[in-house]
Amino acid sequence: MKSYHYSDGQNSFGPITLEELRTKRITANTLIWTEDLVTWTKAQDIPELKDLFIDNTTPQKPLLASLPPEHPIQPHSTEKTANPNYPKPPKTYLVESIITTIICCWLFGIPAIIYASRVEKKFYAGDITGAERDSKNAKKWIIINLIACASIWLLTIGIFGLGLFASILF
């Protein structure tokens, strides 16, 4: 079943079904997102929601008349654009997480992979703060993984070095 997310300009809500979305007070300009869409799209541009706006001859008032300048929700385009108004998702660190998990310690690499894999999904769902938080957590677990790996290697080399040194002396 297809799930929808909608935004009031500051927060995103969802996932909800199409029937639940029809009961919400959305306008033609309300931003909608589903997993099928790459960007946040106006409700009037989504085929299954067009019938909500056909009978309305008067302009509809959006849920929030204006977005605060410090937290604008803008649609994200996968195309490279010179327009700075389109925010980019935070760095996911997914590749780094996988590499450190394979090379180093899987115990500390798994949380890094989990956090890294959630960054883009949260960003495209409108949870920019959550995406940034998961990005920072992924980086933190990568660093923990590298420190744990280096500590284990140094401890192992130290123990074998002492054993080798002791075998030479005795």
Image: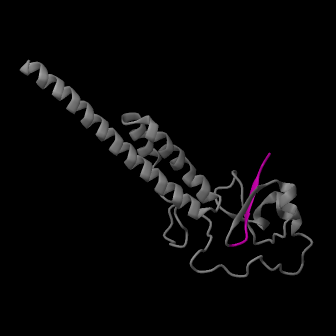
Would residue 140 appear left or right of 123 to someone viewing this image?
A: left
Q: Is residue 70 above or below residue 47?
A: below
For the point 49% across and 59% down, the residue is 90
Q: How many marks?
A: 0
Q: Is residue 135 above or below residue 148?
A: below
Q: Is residue 28 visible?
A: yes
Q: Position of residue 68 (x, y in %)?
A: 62, 80
Q: Is residue 3 magenta?
A: yes
Residue at 22% x, 29% y: name it: 159
Q: Quadrant of the N terminus?
A: top right
Color theme of the render: one colour
Q: Is residue 62 left or right of residue 92?
A: right
Please identify the quarter of the rendering in which residue 103 is found: top left
Is 115 contained in the magenta span? no
Please provide percent x and percent y for residue 166. 12, 23
As drawn, is 47 to the left or to the right of 146? Answer: right
Image: magenta residue range? 1-9
- Which image quarter: residue 124? bottom right
Q: Can residue 79 be spotted in the picture?
A: no
